[in-house]
Amino acid sequence: MKGKFSNPLRYPGSKSGFIEEFAEYVKTNNLSGKEIVEPYAGSASISLGLIHKGVVPSAILFERDPLVFAFWHCVFNKTDELINAIGDLPITLDTWNELDQFRKMDEVSPEHILALGLAGLFFNRTNFSGVLHAGPIGGKLQLSDYAVDCRFNKKDIIKRLLSIAKMSGQVSIFFGDAIKALTDANNADNANRFFYVDPPYYKQGQKLYRYHYKLADHKRLADALSEANFQWILSYDNHHVIEHFYADFDKITRDFRYSSRSPKQEKELLITNIAGWIQPLRPQENAKPKVSRKYLPAIVGSADSIIS
């Protein structure tokens, strides 16, 4: 596709800045042309970015949060309805309070899916740092220099939605649990797929996600990936507990900036179960002489818990 890929969602830890680097991984390891699966869709930046660049032909996305799932469902299946709803929606604190009821819903029903999708976008663009369970920008009293509508440019958001909606024939979105999807995928034919697994952060997950993980959940994910008969690559915040859970797999650390508000770069783990993985030179390293390549397990994927 022509033009720049721009995501309509604001996401803490969004992988938008990782698209170029990840695309090089895919190309270097002969994964171009395979379907990508993201069990934790979130902003879906990697999958959508790779489709936009023509690196992969299609994507399968899973999302457990009803608001995020409904948003992506509406983008690809109810585009006109969503855009019309955005156009008619007042971006005010009164609207914030009216839509707050949808943050209490734990499941998705057909009669509420458009309202849920609209609410997901609304809270993402009007809440502090894009966190769905956070409070509104400017606070409940709106005494800040920044008002609740300061991040909600309707014209720009609709433009981004229309661009992404062109991928509707290439993206399948499913509501469901990521670990179950990973487990079910063992029963699918995944020869022409690869997984990118980007779960809630270990350290900051509770602050950033409504459906965050406890220690037992992180362990369940590690167990599921340890038993997987398909190939995957996993990204995590760097923590000794995660290193312990994946002690039997090769891993590297990379610098990653989780927020544009902070200049600080954090260490993130990339872990994979695929032998023979070649780590390409990062863009900033291309001009440096005698840079050695590192060899790690690769990343390919599969998924079909929802495709059977």
Image: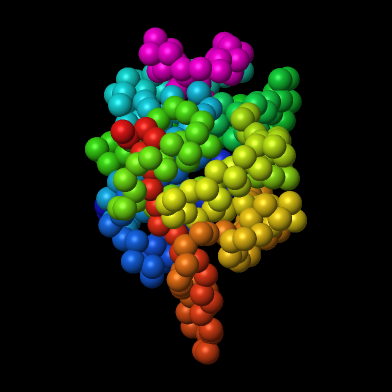
Whether residue 116 appears in magenta in the rendering, the answer is: yes
**Residue 189 appears anywhere in the view:** yes
Residue 101, percent across and down? 58, 12
Mark count? 0
For residue 37, above or below residue 19: above
Provide residue 16's location: percent of width, then percent of height: 49, 51
Relative to residue 29, is residue 224 drawn left or right? Answer: right
Residue projecting furthest to the left: 169
Q: Name the residue rendered at 24%, 38% in the picture.
A: 169
The chief SS type of the magenta part is helix
**Numbered range of the magenta stretch:** 97-122
- Measuring from the top left, give residue 269's x and y in whole percent: 62, 59
Place residue 267 in its image quadrant: bottom right
Residue sitting at x 39%, y 10%:
111
> Is residue 59 inside the magenta stretch?
no
Residue 290 image position (x, y, % from top left): 52, 89
User: In the depicted view, which residue is nearer to us: 151 or 163?
Assistant: 163
What colouring method underlies this structural image? rainbow
User: Is 296 left or right of 30, judged from the image as shown?
Assistant: right
Q: Please name whichever residue, 124 or 30, is drawn nearer the observer in this view of the structure.
A: 30
Q: Identify the residue at image location x=36%, y=25%.
A: 74
The residue positioned 68% from the left and 26% from the top of the image is 135
